Image: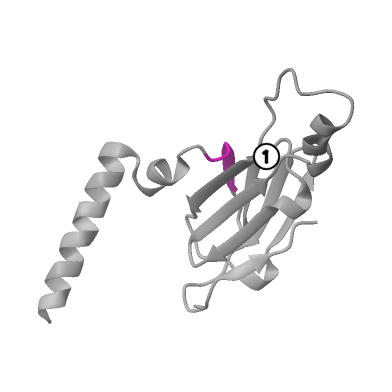
Amino acid sequence: MTPFDDVNRMFDRMSRQFDETWGGFDAMARGDGPDVDLAEYHDELVVVADLPGFDRDDIDLTVRGDVLTISADRSADSTEQDQEGEEGAWVRRERRSESVRRRIRLPDEVREDEASATYTNGVLTVTLPKVHADDEGEDHHIDVN
C-alpha cells in the first residue's frame, strides 16, 4: 500500500458524495448542452439527443472509456449574411451561430470502434455496444450517418 492509495480512496469517497449531493459529473457537464436520454440494454447503450437546427456535418462525437462527448457547432449561413448588401437591410436578426457540448458518463465501458450514430429530423441516436473492462484505448471518433 502506498500513500497514493489513501489519496485515491479519498477522491473516490469525495466523488461519490458529490454525485449523491449535486448530481455529479453529468449535472456539471450539462451546462447548456442538448437534452439526452440514455437507455441501457443487455448488450448495448443507446443515447438519444435533441439537436434541432444542426446539420449532420456540424456534429462531432467522441467516446473514451465511460464518457461520451457530443459537440455541435453551427454558424449563420453566409448567403444570409450577404443579403444586407443587396436590396435591403435586416429588420430583425435572431438566428445566429450556436455551439453546444455535452459529456455523458456511461454506466459501462463500450466498444468504441463498433459505435454507430444516426441523425434524423434533429434527433441524434448513438448506439454503443458494451465491452468488458479489460479493453482500454484512446478517444474514438464516431461518424454520424
Quadrant in which the N terminus appears: bottom left
**In the image, residue 88 lies at what x, y percent?**
84, 23
Residue sitting at x 46%, y 42%: 30
Q: Residue at x 74, y 17 (%)?
A: 91
Say whether residue 2 is left or right of residue 121.
left
**Which of the pair 50/19 is nearer the observer?**
50
Could you tell me which secondary element the residue under label 1 belongs to? loop
Above or below, 124 relative to 35: below
Q: Is residue 43 visible?
A: no
Q: Is residue 99 left or right of residue 87?
A: left
Residue 76 in the image: state x and y as whole percent.
72, 39
- Residue 96 among magenta residues: no
Residue 103 vs residue 93, the one in the foreground: 93
Quick one: 11 or 101, which is closer to the camera?
101
Seen from this angle, which residue lies furthest bottom?
1
What residue sits right under mark 1 in the picture?
51
Q: Residue 107's spot in the image, x, y percent?
A: 47, 55
Q: Provide the residue span drawn in magenta.
A: 33-39
Q: Image height check: is 84 above or below 44?
A: above
Quarter of the rendering containing residue 49: top right
Residue 74, by quadrant, is top right
Q: Counting other residues with Cα less than 10 Å from the Cα at mark 1, is it few (<14), some (14-19), or many (20 or more)?
A: many
Where does the image place residue 61, in percent across and percent down from the top left?
63, 58
